[in-house]
Image: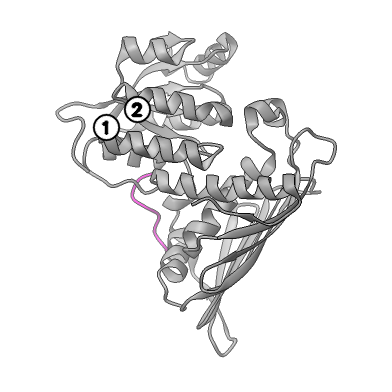
Amino acid sequence: MPALVSGRKVRVAFVGTGGNARAHMRDVHRDPLAEISALCDTSAQALADTVARLPELAAVPQFSDYRTMITEVKPDGVVISIPHTLHFAAAAYALEHGVSVESEKPLTCSPEDARALITRRDRTGLVLTVGYQRHYQGVWRWVHEHVAGGASGPVHFVEAWQCQNWGGGGWRGVPELSGGGQLNDSGSHLCDMMLWAGGIRPTEVFAFQENRGLQVDRISAISFRFPGPGVGTMAIIGDSVRGMDEGMQFWCRDGRVRVDGIDNQVKVTYFSPDGAAHPVAVEEIPDYPVNKDGNFVRCILGQDEPQVPAECGLAVAAFTEAVYRSVRNNAPAKVDW
C-alpha cells in the first residue's frame, strides 16, 4: 500500500475503551511504530477503568464523542470497539474525515453497509481492516493455503460448529446494539474462518434458531450450498456446559482437512485420499510477523498489505444477513454478494 504517514509514528485513537479495546491498546502501546493519541467512550466509568488498568495512558486526551475526537486530534487511524450496530456510523465518519479504520468484528451488520465502507475506502485511499485475529495465526494460515489454495482439490462439503456458554450479557443481548446473538458475536469468527480458510462463497442458506430465553439468537442450525457444487452445515450452540470449543472440516476431492479447537488449543489433521490420518505439527507453523494492530499500523505506513481487508467483513455480513433472513421467513435465502 502507498504510505499515508512517513517520518513519524502512526497516531492511533480508540473509539470504545472496554475490555476488548484494552487488548488493542496494549498492542499499539508496545508497537515502536505507533502511539496512542486519544481515547473515546460514552461511559466516563469505562475511561476511568481503562486508565486504572493502563496507567501509562493517564495523560492521553479523553473524549465522549468520536466526532469531536477526530476533529480535534486528527489521528491517522482509529480502532473501533463498540456495540456491533454502531460500527458503520463510526467507521464511515472516520473515513470521510481522512482517518483509517480498524474495526472489531463484525465490520457491519449488513452487506449494504459493508459495501458502503469499501466504497469510501477506495475513494479515499485509506486503510480499512477487520479485527479477525485468526488470520495472523500460523495454523489457520496453513488451512487457508491448503484448502482455499486448492492443494486438496475443490471443496464439496464443509462442516463447522462452535459451542460456548454464551449468555448474551450487557449490550450483546440487546438486538438494537448487537444486531443479533451469538452468530453475530463470537460466531462471527467461525463464519470468517469457514469462508476465508475454505475459500467458499455460499449462494443460499436455510436456517433455524432458538433464543433460549434471550432477545437474540443463542443456537443456530444452518445449511448452505456453494458453487463447486458443494454443500455444508454450521452449528452455533450458545447454551453449552463448558467453555469455547470449535470444529471445522473440509471434504475435498483429494483429501480432508479437520480442525479441532478445544479450549483454544488447535489441532489440524489432514486425511489423504487413502484415508490415512496425517497430524499437522501446528507448533512448527509460524504466525504472521505482526498481530492485527501491528498490521494496521504498517498498512498506514505503506509497509504491509491488509491481512483482513474489508472484503472479509463483507463476506461475513452477507452470510450472516442471509441466515437471519432465512429464519425470519422460514425459507431458503439467497446470499447477497
**Marking on residue 95:** 2
**Span of residues in magenta:** 285-291
Please name the residue that numbered disc 1 is placed on: 124
Q: Is residue 303 visible?
A: yes
Look at the picture and state if 250 lies above or below 18.
below
Q: Is residue 22 magenta?
A: no
Residue 49 in which image quadrant: top right
Under circle 2, the secondary element is: helix
Q: Residue at x 55, y 13 (%)?
A: 42
The count of marks equals: 2
Kindly identify the amino acid type of the residue bearing the numbered disc 2.
Answer: Leu
Q: Residue at x 57, y 52 (%)?
A: 191
Q: Answer few, some or many: residues within 10 Å of disc 2's Cα (few below 14, many 20 plus, some between 14 and 19).
A: many
Residue 83 in which image quadrant: top right
Q: Percent position (x, y) of residue 298?
A: 27, 39
**Marking on residue 145:** none
Q: Residue at x 29, y 29 (%)?
A: 34
Q: Percent position (x, y) of residue 167?
A: 76, 36
- Which numbered disc flags the more N-terminal residue, 1 or 2? 2
Q: Is residue 60 visible?
A: no
Marks 2 and 1: in contact by CB < 8 Å? Answer: yes
Of residues 189 and 25, which is closer to you in this image? 189
Of residues 285 and 91, which is closer to you in this image? 91
Look at the picture and state if 217 lies above or below 270.
above
Under circle 1, the secondary element is: helix
Q: Percent position (x, y) of residue 159?
A: 64, 66
Q: Percent position (x, y) of residue 245?
A: 68, 54
